[in-house]
Structure formats: structure tokens, C-alpha cells
Image (cartoon, rainbow, N blue to C red):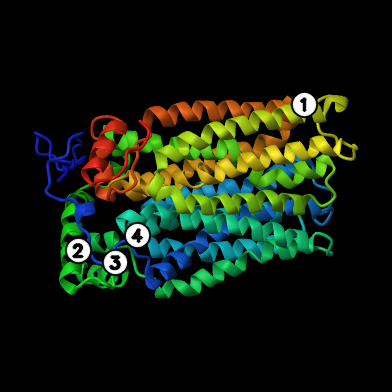
Amino acid sequence: MTAGYVPLATSPRGSTSALADDRVATEVDEAAVVVPGEGTVTPFVRGLVGAAAISGLLFGYDTGVISGTLVVIGTDLGAALTTHQKEAITSATTLGALFGSLGAGALSDARGRKGVLFLANVVFIVGALLQAAAHAVSTMVVGRFVVGLGVGLASCIAPLYIGELAPTRMRGRLVTVNAVVCTFGQVVAYAIGALFARAPSGWRWMVGLGALPAAVQLASLSFLPESPRILLLRDDTLAVERVLARVYPLATKGDVARKVEIMARAVAQSVEIEKTTSMRERAASLFRVGAYRRALAIGCGLQALQQAIAAHVQYYSASIFAAMGFKNATATGLIIAAVNCAFTLVALKIIDPVGRRPIMLYTVPLMALALFSTAFFFSQLTRDTGGVLVPGTDYPRNVSLLVLLSMMVFVAAYATGSGNIPWQQGELFPLEVRGLGTSLCTATNWGVNLLVAATFLSLMEVATPSGAFTLYALVCVLGWVFIWRCYPETSGLSLEEVSEVFADDFGVKKSETMRRAHGLGRAPV
């Protein structure tokens, strides 16, 4: 059995809200409790994860559709869009997502995970329709901002919700389903963009169709259960038993009751903390308590790395390919989206058996090499245009194809690791601060996304494409050092066990000791 730790404990002065870095020992080890069918994904779990992962489709569709929209929107908003207007339209969604994700955690703790998903879908539908009806840049920016609020809420809560319902040894794979659907959403967005590229005002259909998946998820929410851990916070153990009986249909009633009992004991300290401390105290503890702070550093660090090196590909790939002379830039962008989707399926297959840490340690260097290659080929491509891309220039097709190939390699490595593993962030935090911690990590994602979206085209003009991609490659190198030093392996550990990994330090070696106790393989240290 492994010991836990209570970050919010009674201090020597008797304050129930005082903070301490040590947890008291418990006899709880949820990962060791195996019930029949635990390694099987049942039809109920498939349906549950599929419905929840529609949030990923919304995320992916939105990031993909704007790339094609900017290419074909023309003068439909009053005049041809300037570089700054394109950046404003693109970054408005990211700004909305930043605000949405900041509020998602606290809101989900208060209203439940399902309640936030409901709100996210309503907001997204309104935003999609506003965009489709826009006839001015200002209206388009507002519509994009509203869509961003919905995306921010959903991108924070959907992976968290799936992770809290998933069996321990299937958690990584099931959370990754959300990333798979996200990349599929990007493929759908590029395909629809290519379909409507030459249709009059076809971009309105492109942005408006984003309301459909939101409507589907909205209808499906009535069939989804609330997270068992949220139900335990509400002292509704009977509801937890009903949910787990559907998650583990091969288990006996006694098996389910034992699973509920152990889960309840595992989160009992978190429940007590929720009842005796304010939201403000728990938020402050994320920075004051060492274990929380280390979990937050890893979650935010991985999310920052994800967006710092790839947001430009999500939003501007079609614009880059158009400037390079590809006749159907949106269709070329579809190639990138398809590679992203295909290699996210690879991640889905290997994330639990191989582990989070090894995947990141192996794929981030490959991303850096691909970005350095892209920078080199851009320098060769633009030798006769002063290092910058000039639309309308007849660039050598063979060099353009090498740029495309390098970007495909980058996206393949990204999708296998950095594109999905940061979304396992919910497992890093104990229940009492899980919503808040996940919210801050997601906000970091969107904050860095906003920075890149608002500056990438300008950076390309000032630093040249070669300089911009070299900068992103250097960020990859720094990210790899951070991962090697700080990111522990968490696959195979229960949510409650992961929380104790950070009790004394970043827990890279401690997590391996805990995994060996469960008979799990060793990840690179």
C-alpha cells in the first residue's frame, strides 16, 4: 500500500484551512483494487467517452476552420483583410478561450462537470451563428470571442470529466480519445474548407456548421452521468454505485460497493477540505503548497510548450501554403491535418503501455529537428525574396515540397506526444484543487496560444520564416530539458496516487518506485 498526503490540514494552531506539505498516511490504494472487466472498454464507456469527446471536435473544428476561412473570406467583411485584422479575428477566439478556461474549474466544482459542458455548447452555438451572420470585422471578432468562451470551457472540462470516469489503467487512452476527435475535427474543417473554397460566401457555411456538433453534444448530455468524484463531494454514494455499475458491468454488486468504498476513502480528505475551506483558500494553495505548486508547474509547462511550438501550424498553415504558391492552400493544409489525426491514433495506442514520459522524451527532439529543417528549407526557398514569403512569387516547387515534408514530420511527432499528453493534466492534481489546477493549466494553453496567434504573421515578416521556425525549434530544446528534469511517469497510477508523487519533489524517481509496486514497466529516468 502507498501513503497519501493532506495538503490542507489542521495546523498546530488548530486552523482547518492552514496549509502543509505533508499528507498523513492512508490505507487507500485504488489502483490495486481490480474488478472484473476493468481493462475492457464497455459499450457504455465508449458512448460516454464519445459523447464527451465531441468537445474535442469543437476545439479541433474551430482551430482548423479559421485557417481556411482567412484564405477565402475576401472582401465579404467590407474590404480585404489586413495582417492585423487576420490576427485579431484569429486571436479573438483564443482570448475568449482564455477567459472561458479560467472560469471553468471553479464553475465545474460548484455546478458539476456536466453543467459546464452544457453551458459550453450553448455558448458555442451562439458564437458560430454570430460568425456566419457577420458583415463587419467587428462582428466577426465578437463571434470568434464568443466561440472562444465555449471552447475554453469545453477544452478544460471534457478531458477532466473523461479522466474521472475512466478505469485507472485505461485513463490515458480514453482521455486521448478527446485529442483524436480534436484532430479529426481539424480534418473535417479543412475538408469543408476545401469544399466551400470556391462557393460564394462559402466561408459562412464553414464557420456556421460548427454549431452542429455543439447541438449534438447538447442533446446527448441528458444521457451522461455526473463524475463519480463530484457525486462523492455531494455525498451521493448511491449515484456513484449506479455509475460504476455501468462502467464495470462484469463486476458483482459487492465488487462495485467495495470500489465505491475505497474511492470514497481516497477522496475523503479532499471532501473535508472542500467543506472547510473557501475557493479563495484553495486557489491560493496552488501556489503556496509545494505539492500543488509542482503539479501546477508541470501542467502549465507542458501546455505552454504545446502551444508555443504548434499554434502557428493550427491557425496559419493554409496562409503559409498560399504564400508559397500552392494552388489550393486549404487542401494542402488538409494534408497536415490528416497527418495530425493519424499520429494521434498512434498516441491513443501507445500512451498507456509506453507511458507519458518516454513518449515526450522521444518525440520532442524529433520535433526540434523537423523545425530546424523547416527553417533551413525556408531560407533556401526565399533566397531571392529577401528571406520573406512574397505571395505570387513562383517559388521552386521541389523546395516548397521539402518545407511541406518537414512540417509533416513535425506534426507527426507533435501529435504522438505534445499534442495530447498535456491534456492528461487532470491526473496531476488531488480532487480538492483538480478543477482549479486544470483551469489554470488550460488557461496557460490558451494564453500562449493567444500570444502566438496574435504575433505569428508579424514575426514571419520581422524575423523571416526561417528565423521564426528556428525560434520555435529552440523552444523545443528547452522544453525537452524541462520534461527530462521534472515530468514523472503517471500511467498505471490512480488519480489519488498521482497526487502523492509530488509530495517532496517532482517525483520522477518516486513515481517509478510506485509503478514497480504495481508490477508496471520502468520509464526512462
- For this rendering, which residue is in front, 148 or 139? 148
Name the residue nearer the viewer: 491 or 442.
Answer: 491
The residue identified by callout 3 is 37
Specify the amino acid type for callout 1: Ser
Residue 486 at what x, y percent from top left? 37, 30
Q: Is residue 175 left or right of residue 433?
A: right
Q: Position of residue 377 (x, y in %)?
A: 75, 30
Instruction: Choose mark 2 or mark 3, whichever is in front.
Output: 3
- Where does label 4 land, which residue? 166
Q: Amino acid at mark 3?
A: Gly
Vertical order, 465 against 158 (above or below): above
Circle nearer the N terminus (3, 1): 3
In 3D space, how far apart are the residues under numbered discs 1 and 4 (Cα atoms)? Answer: 47 Å
Q: Amino acid at mark 2?
A: Val
Residue at the spot x=29%, y=60% of the render? 230
Q: Check disc 1 and report the residue beneath it.
A: 379
Residue 263 located left or right of residue 346? left
Residue 281 falls in image quadrant: top left
Front-most of residues 461 and 353: 353
Circle 3 sits in a helix, a strand or a loop, which is it? loop
Marks 2/3: CA–CA distance: 16 Å
Who comes first in sequence, dot 1 or dot 4?
4
For marks 2 and 1 on the same chain, the one whose residue lies earlier in the sequence: 2
N-term-proximal mark, 2 vs 3: 3
**Which residue carries the number 2 mark?**
260
Q: Within 10 Å of the Cα at label 4, are there few (<14), some (14-19), or many (20+) other Cα atoms?
A: many
Give left or right: position of 97 versus 72.
left
336 or 131: nearer the eye?
A: 336
